[in-house]
Image: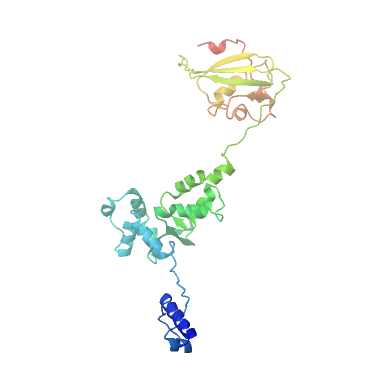
Amino acid sequence: MTLRSSIEKVLLTAMRILFPVDPVQKPASTAESKYGYEQPMIRLVNISSLPDPDPWSDAGMRESQLEDQDLRPILESLEKAEGRPSWQDMASYGPVTKKYWALWDSLKLHNGVLYRKWESDDGRSFRLQLVVPRSRVENVLEELHSSPSGGHFGVMKTTHKVRERFYWDKLKSDVDKWCRTCSTCTARKGPNTRTRGRLQRYNVGAPFERIAIDVLGPLPQTTNGNKYILVVTDYFTKWPEAYVIPNQEATTVAEPCCRIGYAGSECLSAALRPRNELHLRRFYRTRGPARGNENSYKLPCIRSQMEWSKD
C-alpha cells in the first residue's frame, strides 16, 4: 500500500465517522467499494404544517355557540327536535336565554350552526342571520366598523350592516357603544354638536320694535292662582313692565306681550326671549294669524299700569 492510498483511507474513515450513512443509499462508487466507505446522500425534506382551523367555519362557530352559556340550551334543544321547551324548563336560565326562547319559531339550524330567520314585512323575502355568541361580538364589530372595509360609519349605518348578516341580544346597544367609544371616530368626527352664531349688535329704530322677555318663578301661588311674573322690557326706551301670570304656556305669555305700547299700535315686530322650551316656543304663531290682517294685532291699551298687581 502506497502512502497516497493510506492517506485517502484515513481521510475517508474520518469522513465516515463525521457524516453517518443515510438510510437511503445510492449505488457505491469504485472508491467507496474499494475502501469500504459509502458517501452520505444529502436530502432536502419539506415539512408542511397544517393550517390553523378557520374560526368562522361551521365547526368553529358551532364550538363557540356551544361554549356560550346562553346559546347552548337553545342549540341543544333544537338538535333534539322535540319541539319548543316549556316555560318550566326555561325558568332556571338567564334572561338572554329566555329571549332566544321567545324567538323559537325564527331560529333554525344549518350545518349544526344556529341561525335566525329574518323575513321582510310583506313576507316575500327572507335571509338567515348568524346568531353570534358573546365571545365573537367584538370580532364582528371590529370587522364591520373599525376595519378598512368597515369605513367607520355611524350608528345607524353600522347597525344596518350588522343586521344584514348577524344577530345577537342587545345588538343595537352594543353597536351604539362601540361607535361612540371608537378612538378613530372620536378623534376625527368630534362631538355631535351644532355651533351657534356669534352675537351681533341689533340697532333699534322705534319704541317697542324689539323687546326682551323673561319669566320669574315659580313663586308662592297667590289667591288668584298666579305663580309667575312676566317681565317685558323695551329695547328702545328701556321701559319695563311686569305681569303676573298663572303658567308659562305660549298663549298666556303672548297676550301681555301684545298689550305694551300705545293704543291702536301694531304688535311688536321682534321679540328676544330666553331659550326656554316651556314657554314662548311658538310665540309668533300664537299671537295671531298672518300679518296681512292688521286688526288681529291691535289690542286695547291697559289704562292702569298697575292692573297686573290687582291681586
Q: Quadrant of residue 212?
A: top right
* Residue 31: percent from left, percent from top: 47, 87
Which residue is at the front of the view, 230 or 141? 141
Which residue is at the front of the view, 209 or 203? 203
Render colour scheme: rainbow
Q: Is residue 208 placed above or below 111 in the rendered structure?
A: above
Residue at 47% x, 55% y: name it. Answer: 140
Residue at 33% x, 57% y: name it. Answer: 72
Q: Is residue 81 placed above or below 148 in the rendered structure?
A: below
* Residue 57: percent from left, percent from top: 43, 64
Which residue is at the front of the view, 50 or 90? 50
Outermost right residue:
205
Outermost left residue:
88
Q: Is residue 177 left or right of residue 188?
A: left
Residue at 53% x, 26% y: name it. Answer: 249
Asked if residue 32 can be seen in this view, the reply is yes
Q: Is residue 16 left or right of residue 262?
A: left
* Residue 22: percent from left, percent from top: 42, 80
Q: Quadrant of the N terminus?
A: bottom left
